Image (tube, helix red, strand yellow):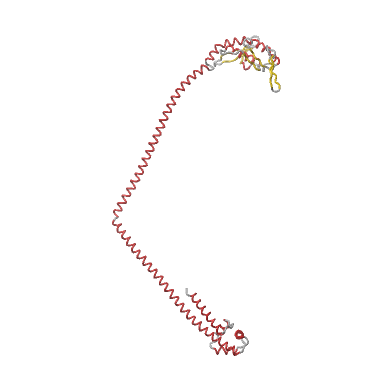
Amino acid sequence: MPGYGRDNILRKAATAAANKEVLKLTKGSKVTEKDLKFLRQFETKEEFQDAVNANSSNSQVRDIRRRLGGSGEVEIQNAQLGQLFDASKTLEKEDKKLCEITERISTFVETKQKSDNKDRLGLVRDRLEVEMDSMRVDVKEKKGILKDYNKNLKGIETNRDIDSKVLGYNQLLINLNLDRDEINTSISDDKNIIKKSNDGIEENQSLIKTIKKETEVLKIFEIYHKMIGKNGISKLVLSSVIPIINYELQRLLDEVCDFEIELSMNDKNEVEFLIIKSGVTKKLKSGSGLEATVSSLALRCVLGRISTLPKPNIIVFDEVLGKVADVNLDNVKLFFDKIKTMYDIILFITHNPIAQDWGDKIITVVKKDDISSLTLH
C-alpha cells in the first residue's frame, strides 16, 4: 500500500518520542531496550517489586541497578525501579495509542487513495465524454458528406468518365506530339542527308573535274615519259647511233686488247653491252678486270664524243687501274695514247708507280703534317 511506508515512519517517530520520555523519567540513566523489555513482563508495579526483591541476585536486575546508580541504597534504587516501571507502562500506553493512530492514518490514506482514484476516473470520464462529443460531431459531418455523396453520385460517375476520357485524350495527345517530334527529327535528318549529299555531289563534281584535268596531264606525262624513257626518243636515237658507237669502240680498242665491245638491242628492246673474244659472246659484266676497265673507259670516251651536249676539253680518270693486273698495264697505256687526240687535257690520278711516267707532265702530291703540297715535273 502507498501509505504503508508513511505509517512506519509515524510509528517509528512515536516510539522514539516515548523512549525519550522514558530516558527523561530515568533522569538520563543508561537504561537499555533490553531493560525495558524486562520491565514489560510484569502487569503491576507490585509484581515487579516482588520480583526484584525475590530475585535481587538475578543478573538482569543487577545490570539495571548498576545502570541506575551503582551500589547506592536499596530504597533509592527500588524507588528508581518503580519510576522506571511507571515509565515503561506509560510507554506501553503510548505504543497502543500510536498503533491506533497508525491504523487511523492507514484508513485515511486508503480513503485518500480512493478519492484520488475517483477524481482520476472522473477526469477520464470527462475526457471520454469530450471525445464522444467530438466523435458525434465527426459522425454527423461524415453522415452529411455521405448524404451529399449519394446525392452527387451520378455527377461523380460522370466526372470520372470525363476524367478517364481526358486522360485518354492527354495520352493520345502525348503520343501524337511524340510522333510529330519523331517526324520533325526525321525531316531534319533527311535535310541534313540531302545537304551532305549535295555537298558530296559538288565535291565529287569538283573531284571529277580535277581528275579529268589530271588525266589529261597524265596522258601528256605518259607520252612524255614514253618519249624520254628507255623506250622513247633516246632509244630511237641510240638505236640509230649504235653502229657508230660500235665502230668507234672497235677503232679505240684495235691493237689495244684481244677482244671487242659491242652494243646491241635485245628482244625486250633493251640495250645490252657484250664482249666478244675468240668467237665467244658474253655480257660485259662477266668480263675480267682488264676487260671491264678498258671497256668502261672506251664507252665513256665514245659516248662523250658522239653526245650533242657541250663537251669539256678535259677528262679526269681517278684510280681506274685498281682492277687491272700489272702485266696488262701496257695495253691500257696504248688506250690512253689513242684518246690523247680526243681531249686537250687528260688528268690521270694513280698510286701505281708503273704508270707514273705515262703523262707528259707529272704532278706529285706530298702530305706532311696534315698539309698537302703539289710539285709539277
Question: Is 148 above or below relative to 90?
Answer: above
Question: Is 372 above or below relative to 76?
Answer: above
Residue 256 % position (x, y): 65, 10
Q: Is residue 1 visible?
A: no
Depth check, front residue: 116 or 311: 311
Residue 115 % position (x, y): 42, 74
Depth check, front residue: 318 or 365: 365
77 vs 367, left or right, is: left
Q: Can residue 361 be seen in this view?
A: yes
Position of the C terminus by quadrant: top right
Residue 220 % position (x, y): 48, 19
Question: Is 173 above or below relative to 335?
Answer: below
Number of marks: 0
Residue 281 % position (x, y): 61, 13
In which quadrant of the rendered view does residue 337 lie? Answer: top right
175 vs 369, left or right, is: left
